[in-house]
Amino acid sequence: MKIYPRCAPCLLSRVQYEAELSTSDAGLQGKAVLAGIEVLREHFIEGSPATHLSTKIHREAYRVLGDIDPYIKKKRQGNEAAKKLMPFARDFVANGDGGDSFRRAVLMSIIGNSFDFGVLGYDADSETAEDKMVQQIQHGLDVDDSDKMKSLLGDVVYLADNCGEILFDTLVFEEIRKLGGKITLVVRGAPILNDVTMEEVDELGIGNMVDRVLTTGSNAIGLCLREAPPELVEALGNATLVISKGMANYETMSEYDFRPLAYLLKTKCESVAEDMGLEKNMNVARLLK
C-alpha cells in the first residue's frame, strides 16, 4: 500500500501517544513529536510504501525517547483483557451460528483485530466488551472467502499482528490443525507498537500451538523483506497459504507478490479501506490467488 496524505496526522498522533506512554516529561514528548515531523518532512514521498515511512517515524521516536518498548505495559494489559474474553470466544467457535467452525474462528480472529487491545482501552471486565463482540458476531463477515481458504491449509505461514488479538488467532490455529495443516507463526523481530514478539509468544505458551515460530528479523512495521531472515523468505515462498493478519501486515504484503495470500482484518482506517476498494469498519477475510 502506498502512502496517503491522511497518514501523516495519524502517524504523528501515534507518536504523541507512545511518547506519553514512555514518559511524563512534556519536553521529551515534544522532542519525539518534532522528530516525527522532521521524518515526515524528509520522507513523505508520494507513491512510496506506507510502511517505509511509518517504520522510520516510529524508530526515530523510540530513539529520541530512549525507550525500546513504550507499549510494554499496554501489551500485557491487552493480553490479560483478551484472556478474560477467550471462554466466550471459544464457545462461539465451537457452538455458534454462521458457517462451520473454521469460518467462525476466522470471524472471531477479525473481531480481536477490531479491538486493538492495549491501545484503545477496552475493559474486558465489563459487559461492554462482550456486548461489542456480540454486535460484531451479528454483523458477520463483509468479505468472506473463508471456504476458499480451507483447501489451502496444508502449510500455512501466519503473520501475526497485535498482542491481545493473538489469543483469538489461536482459535484459527486450532482449526487449521484439525484440518491437518501445519502452521509457521511469524511475529516481529523486536518491539514495535503493541505487536507480538517472541517474548509474548513464550509468555503465552503459543509456541506449543503451532509447528514453528519465526520472526520478521526486525522491528519494521509489518514485514520488510530486506530485513527478514532467509528462513522466513523461504517459508513464504513455499507456503500453501500466507495469512496476513491486521492492517500493518496488509500495508506491506500488498507490496509483494506472495500467493495464495489471505487478508484477515478490520478496515479500521480510511486509507486501508480505500486501498482495498472497501469501506471503513468492514470485517474482511479476502483470498488472493
Image: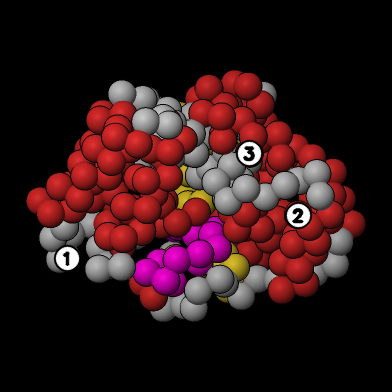
Query: Helix or strand or loop: what does disc 2 sit on?
Result: helix
Query: Which amino acid is tagged 1?
Result: Gly
Few, some or many C-alpha atoms within 10 Å of disc 3 (few <14, some 14-19, many ≥20)?
A: many
- In magenta segment, residue 150: no
Query: Which amino acid is tagged 2?
Result: Ala
Q: Which residue carries the number 3 mark?
A: 78
Query: Helix or strand or loop: what does disc 1 sit on?
Result: loop
Q: Is residue 41 left or right of residue 171?
A: left
Q: Is residue 249 visible?
A: yes
* Image x and y of residue 49, in percent: 23, 57
- In magenta segment, residue 261: yes
Q: Is residue 14 left or right of residue 281?
A: left
User: Label 2, label 1: how many angstroms apart (C-alpha)?
Assistant: 38 Å
**Viewer-nearest of labels 1 and 3?**
3
Q: Is residue 181 left or right of residue 190?
A: right
What residue is at 24 percent from the left and 37 percent from the top?
Answer: 31
User: Label 3, label 2: how many angstroms apart (C-alpha)?
Assistant: 13 Å
Q: Is residue 224 left or right of residue 276?
A: left
Image quadrant assignment for residue 288: bottom left
Q: Which mark is residue 47?
A: 1
Q: Which residue carries the number 2 mark?
A: 129
Residue 143 to residue 234: above or below: below
Seen from the viewer's position, the closer of residues 225 and 4 is: 4
Q: Earlier in the sequence, mark 1 or mark 3?
A: 1
User: Label 1, label 3: how many angstroms apart (C-alpha)?
Assistant: 34 Å
Query: Which amino acid is tagged 3?
Result: Gly
Q: Which residues are magenta?
A: 257-273
Seen from the viewer's position, the closer of residues 127 and 135 is: 127
